[in-house]
């Protein structure tokens, strides 16, 4: 494959299926006009990212609802044992990390871990399978790993950030939260501007680092799978070799996103 064809192949696989408003109504980007919805347009929607993230979220709900309905106090089956193992794993880590009292944190941690893990898991599917099938159906672009879209990772981190602000104000009060931002690390009125800059930057860094860490690792993994797909007949052993290594990345990124969320919310509940 020539360098030009390789570049086009990579660009094609990194392009989202997008929809946006035009003079003739809503339209999708196409091979003929791939930049139709690009740029800083606020009405552009990454349809593939939204679709796969919603479907994977529904799969998570269905799996755990099915496990709850079939749960038994007797000898559990393999499926129930697996679900209980996942729940115990999340619950143990939440209890070790979160020191406040909030019934939302454990379910939130489980949801984040399972949902992000399922989104990351899509990266193990060979890059041409589902997009190739979609192409036969007339769909020009299709990215199947939602966590490689910075819009999804930022949306999740912003949701966590809103919870951080909500519980910080709820537990500490507006006055306490304001003092935390203005009187730390230097407890003197003259240092308020400096404290506000330092604490404000630290506060804003939480959602930014949370989103970019997940996006960066998964995007890099996806890019390596795409490069492997360029190697023709050699791609199969290389794909499975990288997939085995990538299994650890998939798990770790879901676990890290969950744990950082719990840590940040634990700090929001601390009232000094």
Image: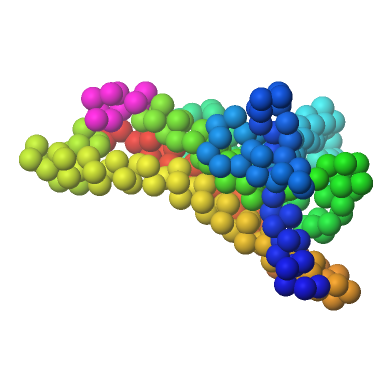
Q: Residue 76: where, in percent of width, then height?
A: 84, 40
Is residue 237 visible in the rendered image? The answer is no
Q: Residue 220: where, in percent of width, then height?
A: 62, 61
Secondary structure that dominates the magenta span: helix
Residue 106 in magenta stretch = no
Name the colouring of the figure. Answer: rainbow
Q: Which residue range is magenta in the image? A: 169-178
Rendered view: 252 above or below 208 = below
Q: Please report the residue visible at 85 percent of the width from the left and 76 percent of the height from the top.
A: 234
Q: Nearer the viewer, residue 168 or 6?
A: 6
Q: Residue 26: where, in percent of width, then height?
A: 71, 26
Q: In the image, is 87 to the left or to the right of 77?
A: left
Q: Nearer the viewer, residue 16 or 60?
A: 16
Q: In the image, is 196 to the left or to the right of 257?
A: left
Farthest residue to the right: give it: 136
Q: Residue 242: where, in percent of width, then height?
A: 74, 69
Q: Please report the residue visible at 25 percent of the width from the left and 37 percent of the height from the top.
A: 181
Is residue 157 visible in the rendered image? The answer is yes
The quarter of the image holding the C terminus is top left
- The image quadrant that residue 2 belongs to is bottom right
Q: In the image, is 132 to the left or to the right of 260?
A: right
Q: Nearer the viewer, residue 227 or 146?
A: 227
Farthest residue to the bottom: give it: 234
Residue 175 in magenta stretch = yes
- The image quadrant that residue 191 belongs to is top left
Q: Please report the residue visible at 31 percent of the width from the left and 45 percent of the height from the top.
A: 201
The quarter of the image holding the N terminus is bottom right
Count of all numbered marks drawn on residues in the image: 0
Q: Please report the residue visible at 56 percent of the width from the left and 35 percent of the height from the top.
A: 41
């Amino acid at each position: 494959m020539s360098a030009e064809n390789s570049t086009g192949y990579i660009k094609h696989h990194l392009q989202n299926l997008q929809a946006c408003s035009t003079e003739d109504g809503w339209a999708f980007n196409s091979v003929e006009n791939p930049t139709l919805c690009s740029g800083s347009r606020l009405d552009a929607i990454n349809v593939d990212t939204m679709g796969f993230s919603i479907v994977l979220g529904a799969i998570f709900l269905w799996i755990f609802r099915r496990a709850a309905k079939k749960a038994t106090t007797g000898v559990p089956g393999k499926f129930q044992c697996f679900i209980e193992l996942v729940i115990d794993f999340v619950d143990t880590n939440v209890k070790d990390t979160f020191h406040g009292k909030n019934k939302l944190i454990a379910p939130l941690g489980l949801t984040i871990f399972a949902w992000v893990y399922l989104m990351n898991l899509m990266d193990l599917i060979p890059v041409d399978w589902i997009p190739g099938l979609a192409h036969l159906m007339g769909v020009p672009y299709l990215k199947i790993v939602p966590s490689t879209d910075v819009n999804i990772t930022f949306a999740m981190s912003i949701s966590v950030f809103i919870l951080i602000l909500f519980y910080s104000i709820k537990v500490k009060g507006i006055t306490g939260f304001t003092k935390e931002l203005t009187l730390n690390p230097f407890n003197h009125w003259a240092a308020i501007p400096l404290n506000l800059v330092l604490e404000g930057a630290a506060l804003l860094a939480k959602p930014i680092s949370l989103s970019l860490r997940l996006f960066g690792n998964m995007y890099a993994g996806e890019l390596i799978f795409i490069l492997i797909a360029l190697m023709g007949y050699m791609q199969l052993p290389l794909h499975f070799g990288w997939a085995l290594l990538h299994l650890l990345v998939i798990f770790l990124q879901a676990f890290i996103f969950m744990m950082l969320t719990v840590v940040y919310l634990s700090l929001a509940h601390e009232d000094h």
